[in-house]
Image (cartoon, grey):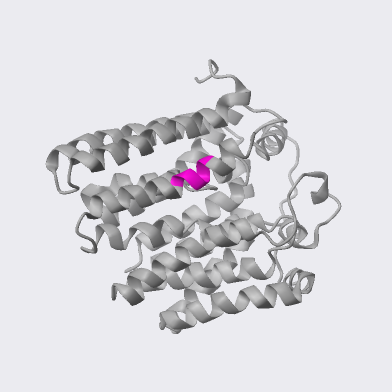
Amino acid sequence: MFDWIPIEYYTATHYHVLLLVALFIVFNSLIFDVADQQSIKIFGPLGYFIVLVLILYMGLRPISVHYFGDTSTYAGIFKAMRNGQEAKIQKDYVFNYFMKWCSNFMDVHSFFLLLDILYIIPSFLFSRKYFGKYWFFAMFMFIGSFSFWAYGTNGLRNGLATSLFILGLYFYNRKVLMYMIFTLGYFMHASLIIPIAAFVVSGVYKNPKIYLYIWFASIPLSLVGGSAWTTLFAGLGFEDRTSGYLTNSEENLEQFSQTGFRWDFLFYSASAVFIGWYFIFKKQIVDRFYIHIFGVYTIANSFWILVITAAFSNRFAYLSWFLMPAVFIYPMFRYKIWKDQYKTFALILFAYFMFTYFMNVIKGK
């Protein structure tokens, strides 16, 4: 469908288009107020169009061993299943049995399209539920996040698992259904146990100061403990490949991933911690749901900080990063905080997206 875009520019084209949308939001905020109905009439249809095109663009991407990370690996497994090769499934049962079932009547392109529908729709539903007519702004925060594209084209199981977590949050007031969806996400990818555990802990201990203490304490603990934390957490019982991300197995080191203490990513993570602190403590936002999300983010992010020196710790960083859009945007479209709130939000959104653009387009060249 998008064969006319050279594969080497496929990902960059995605970010270039998002940059244009981000600029449009900024320019619109300089002219209109967020309550202006004319503005809402523009962004409503635009939002549906962008979501639809994104699903098609991401789901129908070319399959190449040189681009989109694990896409070619999953494609090879899927084609083998489709050709009748016996599959020995011992982990990630939901994902693997789902792939096996789809291989009975789908081709590989239809399979990836379906996966990205399942990946994107939970963020759409979450945005629609919690932000009403302003849903597009929340959805763009999700789409424009640093790792959103990567986990829809590369770390597919991780991405689908965290999307199921977001879907669970959609049913926040229906606890049995929510935990059932969380469990489904865990069997999509075992690493989801980290945000699930963070959700339980922050549900029991509801004081947001505790979350801040945990997050700040994790930094010196990581600096002092170093690789000892990766060795400790590698034995938590994740499936083999997830443990390999921590222990730097020989198989995983065939791929490239920067190691060492990632101060750039720490500052990126700290932006959500700061914004949560600002809304909760400075602006006195007392919202049970928001405080709970903030707790999940800070606790899960603390785990990543402890294992930050591992070669593939980015896989664990995403277990908190996927909640950054909600931490940023939730109070801004639920409460009156600033005089020119729409303009302030647009500038925050633009700065948030520009980190994504810089890391994936400018620095990624």
Q: Quadrant of residue 186?
A: bottom right
Residue in the picture at 62% in, 40% down: 363
Q: Residue furthest left?
A: 37
Q: Nearer the viewer, residue 311 or 236?
A: 311
* Residue 198 placement (x, y as % from top left): 52, 73
Residue in the picture at 13% in, 42% down: 37
Q: Tell me if I can see residue 185 in this picture.
A: no
Does the stretch in magenta take in 52? Answer: no
Residue in the picture at 58% in, 43% down: 359
Q: Nearer the viewer, residue 292 or 215?
A: 215
In this picture, is 275 found above or below 78? below
In this picture, is 203 found above or below 160? below
Q: Nearer the viewer, residue 33 or 188?
A: 33
**Which residues fall within the magenta stretch?**
353-357
* Residue 276 placement (x, y as % from top left): 40, 68
What is the magenta segment's predominant secondary structure?
helix
Residue in the picture at 27% in, 54% down: 131
Does the stretch in magenta take in 356? Answer: yes
Quadrant showing the C terminus = top right
